[in-house]
Image (spheres, rainbow, N blue to C red):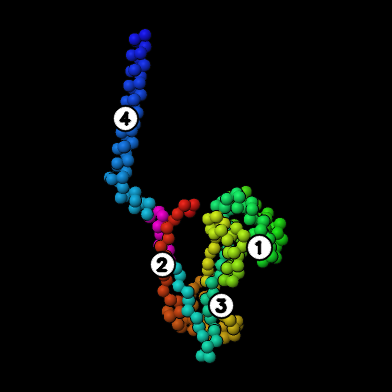
Amino acid sequence: MAIEEKTILNRLYVVAGLLLLFFIIIAVKLIDIQFVEGRKYRELAKNNTIKNFVINASRGNIYADNGSLLATSVPKYDIRFDAVTVSSENFKNQMPELAKSLSKMFGESVSYYKEKFRKARAGKNRYMLVAKNLGYSDYIKIKKFPLFNLGPYKGGIIVEQTTVREHPLGKIAERLVGNQVKNKPGVYKVGFEGAFDKYLKGKNGRRLKQKIAKG
């Protein structure tokens, strides 16, 4: 009996010793990460989550001597949908109303939009195209639709802005006003656009962005 108790105690000592060694290793590693290599990992985390992004300058307007607008930069918006970030409850309750609103705005059937959103949900599509080249007023309107009005994280709405150069007078004096060189966005070599390019193009800005939960 005494031999069995001694054997059990020895096993307990071995297990306790191994556990103590395990905790010591963890403590040493934590100290190493926190104090020895802490700066390196903090810099790495910062570089992976905080980045500078270029904000392209909005090209200046061109006016005639009577004040009429000859060329201007107009913002356009693409709307996409992240089907993963939306909760099951929000998707179930608000997606049908969103489909109705989109149908009324763009003319496709309600069933078309319902099927499109369901497929995106089933396929875990995080970048489904909803609408392209919207003007500012339509962009503001669509942001207020059911589900989308919950924002990017709860409502899954993704907004991408681009700038398009427009000429209110159309083809009138097109050569004189100038236009972009074909297949070279932002490059102007003729007309007022080319002659005064350095004044019209402006200066790019920068925006500091930090990645948070759910990307």
* Residue farthest toward the bottom in the current orientation of the protein: 66
Q: CA distance from mark 2 to mark 4?
A: 51 Å
**Res. 172 image quadrant:** bottom right
Q: Position of residue 65 (x, y in %)?
A: 51, 90
**Which of the labelled discs sits on residue 21, or is there none?**
4
Q: CA distance from mark 3 to mark 1?
A: 27 Å
**Res. 134 image quadrant:** bottom right
At horizontal 38% and vertical 55% (from top left) the residue drawn is 47
Q: Answer whether labels 2 and 4 touch (C-beta < 8 Å).
A: no
As shown in the figure, which amino acid type bears the numbered disc 2? Arg
**Res. 16 image quadrant:** top left
10 Å crowding of disc 1: few (<14), some (14-19), many (20+): many
**Closer mark to the observer between disc 3 and disc 1:** 1
**Closer mark to the observer between disc 2 and disc 4:** 4
Q: Answer whether labels 3 and 1 touch (C-beta < 8 Å).
A: no
Q: Position of residue 88 (x, y in %)?
A: 60, 49
Q: Position of residue 116 (x, y in %)?
A: 66, 55
Q: Answer whether labels 3 and 4 touch (C-beta < 8 Å).
A: no
As shown in the figure, which amino acid type bears the numbered disc 1? Leu
Q: Helix, strand, or loop for circle 1?
A: helix
The residue to which callout 3 is attached is: 166
Q: Which residues are magenta?
A: 47-54
**Closer mark to the observer between disc 3 and disc 4:** 4
Vertical relation: 59 (above or below) 110: below
At horizontal 55% and vertical 52% (from top left) the residue drawn is 85
The residue to which callout 2 is attached is: 206
Q: Position of residue 140 (x, y in %)?
A: 57, 68
The residue to which callout 1 is attached is: 102
At horizontal 57% and vertical 61% (from top left) the residue drawn is 149
Q: Helix, strand, or loop for circle 2?
A: strand
